[in-house]
Image (tube, rainbow, N blue to C red):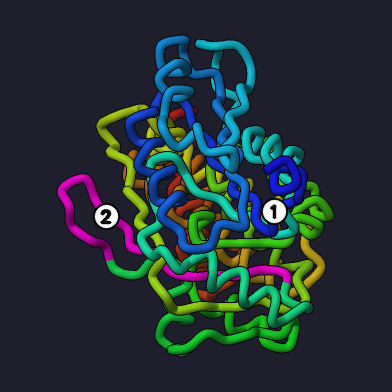
Amino acid sequence: MSETMNKSPAISIIVPTRNRPHLLQAALASIAAQRCDDYEVIVIDDGSDETQRSACAALPELADARFRLHLLGLSGQHGSGPSVIRNAGLDLARGEIVVFLDDDDCWTDPEHLARLLAAFAAHPDVDAYIARQQAVRTDGSITPEAWLPGLATRLQTQTVLALPAELAALTEAGGFAHLNIFAVRRSLALAIGGFWERTSYEEDRDFFWRSIDRAAAVVFDPHVVARHNIPDRAKQDNVTTRYSQTERWLISVLVSQHISVSVRRPAIARLNRGYAGDILRHLSRHHAAEQRLPTAAYFARQALAARYSSKWLAYTLYLSLLACMRKTEHIK
């Protein structure tokens, strides 16, 4: 037994949690149901209150020596955020391959880790692995494929994408791989500095594209392996739901800019500049509808710089003219 305990596992699974032991148990149970057992589970509790921490520590899965609970900060303190938690998990991880599972989600395919491990073993040049998942709303309805839908359409079997030659398959596929369905070599995750701790929103998109930028090859597996429960906007028990729509747009722009200045491959930088341009257009239209014309014109100019089009140039000039006319009226 001691020899098994001292042996480094192949896979480290990082599970962030805070004040949700009832959801966490379902996530851990889905890990325990995996038919591959060459893993460790690092549960990072981010400042849950004392009662919730006690409930978390009492979960039956934590009696398994492969499951470890680590307490981050004092009980009841303000949460450190998902980037900080996951970086703490990366520091503790012993496995060569790192995977993630949110505490309010679960894996639905018991063969997920076995296939993932086999793919890395068969292809030593592979640095990352992507699968698929379903997203379920609070009313039980299932949303259309939202993570790299272009890959799901094009690639019907497990495929190795050699980068950068086949980078277009990822940058043109739409979206990015949610962390529940993403695996990466720990050495690569550490080489890029882990998660960007300046953001608590879209940190997964930032981590994904910076990881892909350094990867030599990526495996895409079309199996649906996870269930992502979309947070209830009416509740503030999730980082995403604490931000207003405008705040989410602003953070999305910042994340896109961070990716663009961090990556080496032009296609990834170009993709994220374009994404920032789309979000800036949303901000411009939003403020125009609110009759905040100077602000709308400002974001329109930013959007034009991020992604040029003659149509948007005309719209920007129109907004700027309206803003000037409004300013003149106020002066009179």
Q: Residue at x 64, y 40 (%)?
A: 86
Where's residue 12, x and y in %? 65, 50
Which residue type does callout 1 highlight?
Pro
Tell me if mark 1 has few (under 14), some (14-19) or many (20+) residues whose alpha carbon lies within 10 angstroms of its own.
some
The residue that label 1 is drawn on is 9
Residue at 47%, 10% in the rendered image: 50
Viewer-side label of 1, 2: 1
- Judging depth in this view, the residue of 170 and 315 nearest the camera is 170
Q: Element at badge 2?
A: strand
The kind of residue tagged 2 is Val
Up-down relation of residue 233 to residue 161 (above or below)? above
Q: How many numbered marks appear?
A: 2
Kind of element beneath mark 1 = loop
The residue wearing badge 2 is: 136
The C terminus: image quadrant: top left
Magenta residues, start to end:
127-143
**From mark 1 to mark 2, how far is it between C-alphas?**
32 Å
Q: In which quarter of the image is the N terminus?
A: top right
Dividing the picture into quadrants, the one containing residue 11 is bottom right
- From this view, report whether residue 194 is shown above or below residue 259: above
Q: Position of residue 326 (x, y in %)?
A: 43, 39
Image position of 275 (left or right of 242)? right
